Structure formats: structure tokens, C-alpha cells
Amino acid sequence: MEKQQQPGGEEEEEVISSVRYRGWKSMPYVIGNETFEKLGTIGTTANLLVYLTTVYHLPSVRAATLLNFFSGTTNLAPLLGAFLSDTFLGRYTTIAAASLASCLGMLVLTLTAAIPSLHPPPCTASSSSSSCQGPTHGQLAALLAAFAFLVVGAGGIRPCNLAFGADQFDPRTDSGRRGIASFFNWYYFTFTVAMMLSATLIIYLQSNVSWAIGLAVPAALMAISCALFFMGTRLYVRVRPEGSPFTSFARVIVAAVRKRRVPAPASADDLFDPPHQSKLVAKIAYTDQFRCLDKAAVVTPESRSSPWRLCTVQQVEEVKCLARIIPVWSAGIVYFIVVTQLGTFVVLQALQMDRRLTRWWAFEVPAGSMVVFNMMAMTVWIPVYDRVVVPALRRVTGKEGGISQLQRIGVGLVLSVATMVVAAAVEQRRRRLGAVGVKMSFLWLVPQQVAAGMSEAFAAIGQTELYYRQFPENMRSVAGALFFLAFALANYASGFMVAAVHRTTGWLAQDLNHARLDLFYLTVAAIAAANVCYFLLCARWYRFKNTTIADHVELPDYHHHQPGTANTIGSKV
């Protein structure tokens, strides 16, 4: 558990007061770094499926499976990144190392497109797609090396960049708290801008100019991101790593197992519950769920000598918070499996459709830009929901957010079912027209993309808010990593599902006109419907966290880098 604060901590207060928060003075470097990092990362990965199928000549199913595993690993890596950052490195060092790794990965990927020996030769005009030469082992090794560097970069940047930006503001002052809230707004604004530019301009360069230039631009943007980050080094406030909550989790589990035969106390008052002295973490009220874990807080003669034999009620309740989240979180995994299918195959659908905006304009929308419609739906809907829908719901329900986080997630899950049903209907018509040589307009894909965007606005953001609010304050980095872990497991499961369906049915043939993608979508819709039922059971059982004191944010241990001083975080590693 965290070290308890001692009363009258004048030395601690002096340390906190000596920190020079630069606030918005450091934001050009922080936000600039994050903007260019997102432009580089999203610009590199948004069109990878097309790159794998057209340049590396991988079959569409194999390319989709490889991309799912790559996406899964990039979302699994933040769990390790959060652990290393909180326990050993600190956020500054983690972001610095991860940014360099991302830049190197983008450089290697650019070289695979620019150097002819690092990718298969182009197909000849007379050869069919099935007879094109595939990649050699060396060419695949270069591609996978680029992916490996990108995974390392994602593992360090994703769990740390938002928290690192918030570290630059003083949370004890009104201006600091306003700065943190404003920073969050700018953070998501830069994400939207990066998505728009990456899914339009950068994908256009990749599809219509050359892959070498289209991949070199994101690599250059990532290099600018690294430069901006290091230029602001003298201004940054760096929070020292305070240790991982995983140790506390392990102590509760070990203590409960060791005392599994000890009789349960008749009352919660008999459990070990010393006065709560932490200024960082609010006291969590006792709950009677998962009572088997209560035995970790049962006092026995031999237990007082070791923290691995006796834990506080606070420690036990923190583990219960995680245990209560797991069923809801598992429903989120299935949800992400559903939306992953649409994100993967909509690109292949668009490649076999008429991608002109009008019949009289020769410009074709790149297939990889279909994600723009998801993003536009989210961009438009979120402010409408926040400014119009929530106040209206608040007047009806009396709840601060209009509806609870669980209700918001539930709406998103229901929309995911509708999304897949619409996608199946559109694909059925596209296939029927494609069989007679008629290309359907890509605009028919827009409704399902809009529905998917609105689904994410409810389900994905609802999950993020639920995890943030329901986890103890010292576990919020774990909450963020848990969200990415759901993405990772969904990507892996999606890859296995696509491979299994392809092996056992003829639904996912190389030519979608001879496939039955509509039946695959209907199967996914059925899975999504079953997931809604499962989620409703989990939501009915779920019990929200109840704290006995108001949340109070105070960051207890800092280091501000001054000219001529060593990097404290680096010296601690």
C-alpha cells in the first residue's frame, strides 16, 4: 500500500510549494508534441491494410489477421508501459523513450516502401492478384521490425501523455484546475484534427502519389514531435514514480488465500481498518460483495508481522473495485470485437465500390478514409450530447450526467447491434450489384459508419468515464491501461474469429463479390445482441463505489528540472 502521510508534514508541504508550475507556458511543447505524434501515428497506421495488400501482396484475410494482431499488441503494450512508468521510470522518461521508438518504427516502415529490395516487386499488368509475388522472409522481417518499434512507442505514449500534460498545472489552485480541464479539451481537439488530416491528406498521398512519400510525411511529423518534446524539457514538472498498485493487489489476494480457513468476522467493524491518512486517495466505504476478500483484513496473532498477511479494509475495497469492473469490462471486449470487424472490412468493401463523390468528378475518395465518417459523427454528436441532450436528461432524471455511465455504455452496445444489421443489408445489396458488374456508390457505407461513430461516442467514452470514476485515485493509470487492454484482447479475438470463419466457411473469400460478408456481419450482429443481454445482467449486479470523504487531489512528490541539475527520474532507474 502507499506510504501513509504523517501529520504535520511541513517538509512535504515545503517540497510541494517549491515546485514551479509553468502551466500554459509548457503547453506549446506538450500539445505540439501530442499533435504531431498523433498525426504521425495515425497517418502511419490508418491505411496499413491497403499497404499490406497492394505493396506486400498479402491476401486480404492474412493482412487483416496480421493487422488485428498488430493493433492488439499496440493496445496491450500500455499495460506494461503504465507499470514501468508508475513504478520505475516516471512519465517524462517513458514518453521520451517511447517517442524515439515510434519515430524509428516509422522510419523503418518508410524504408520498406522506398527501398525496392525491402518489398515485393510490383505486379505486372498481365498478372492477376493471386499470381503476384509475395514478400520474402527478409522483407517480412523488416516490416515486423517496424511494427515492433511502433508497439514500443504506443506502450509508452498512450498511458502517459494525457497525465503528463495535466502534471504541468497546479491542482491546488483554481487557475490550475481550470487549466487541467482546458487541457483535456485541447487534447481531444488535437486528436480530432489529427484523425481528419491523417484520414484525408496523408492517405491521399499514400494512395495517389506514392507510398514512400505518404509514409515519409508521418515519420517527419513524428520527428518534429520528438524535437518539440525535448525543447520543453527545462519547463516540465515531473512527478516521481510512487510504486505500482499491483503490489497492493497481490498482497490482498495472498493474505486472503492464506487465511481462507479463518472464520469470517460477524461484523465489518472487526476488520483491520486503521484511520485513513492519505491525502491522495479518498476513503472507500466497506461493501459486502466479494466477502472472501475480507479475510485479508481479518486480524490473527501471526498476521500483524507482515503486510502479506494483513491488509487494511481500504486495500481490500480497492481490489473489490477492480473485481466489480471486470464483468462490465469483459462486455466492452466483445463490443470492441464487433466494431473492429466493421473497421477492417469496410476498407475492402470500399475498394470494390465507386468511390467518386459525384459521377462528374473523377476524384476518388481513398478507401482508408472511410474512418472519417465515424470521426465526423463523433465530433458532431459529442458537443450536441454534452450541451443539449445531457441538460434535458438531467431535468428528467436529476442525475448530474443525465444518465449513468452504465446506461451510456448500454446505449452504445445497442447501437452496435443496429450498426452491424445495417452493414449486412448494405453489403447484401453491394454484392448483388457487384455480381452483374455494377459498382455501388461508397456513400451507401456512410450510414453504418455514422452509426458506428455514435455507438463509440456512447460505449467507448462511457467506459472511459466509468473506469476513471470508479477506480481509486491511485489506480487511475491502471484504469486507462485496462481500457487499452480491452482493445488488445478484442483485436486478438477478432483475428482468431476471422481466421476461424475463413477456414470453416466461404464467407470471406479474396473477392468480396464471391464472398458472403453479409452473413458474417449478421453473425457479428447476433454476437453483439447476446453481449447486450450479458451487459444488462452485469449492470443490474454492479454496485457503484462510495467514498466517505470528498475527493482531494494533491500530488505529493515532484521534481522540476532546473538548468544544471541531473534528471532525478533517470537517476532513480
Image: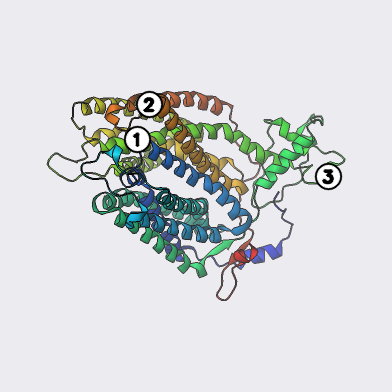
- State if disc 1 and disc 3 touch (CB < 8 Å): no
In this view, the residue in front, 69 or 204, is 69
Left or right: 342 as drawn, with respect to 336: left
Residue at the farthest right position: 301
* Residue 232 in view, yes or no: yes
Q: Which residue is mark 3?
A: 304
**What is the CA distance from the residue labelled 1 to the residue labelled 2?**
11 Å
Instruction: Give me the residue at 59% from left, 42% from top.
Output: 471
**What is the CA distance from the residue labelled 2 to the residue labelled 3?**
58 Å
Q: In which quadrant of the rendered view does residue 509 lie?
A: top left
- State if disc 3 and disc 2 touch (CB < 8 Å): no
Q: Is residue 444 above or below residue 314?
A: above
* Image location of residue 53, percent across then percent down: 33, 42
Identify the element where label 3 is drawn: helix
Give the residue type that dot 3 points to: Arg
* Image location of residue 397, percent across then percent down: 47, 31
Q: Quick one: label 2 or label 3, which is nearer the N terminus?
A: 3
Left or right: 244 as drawn, with respect to 227: right
Which mark lies nearer to you, 2 or 3? 2
- State if disc 2 and disc 1 touch (CB < 8 Å): yes
Q: Which residue is mark 1?
A: 345
Q: Which residue is mark 2?
A: 520
In this view, the residue in front, 510 or 228, is 510
In this view, the residue in front, 544 or 229, is 229
* Image location of residue 542, percent across then percent down: 58, 30
Give the residue type that dot 1 points to: Phe
Identify the element where label 2 is drawn: helix
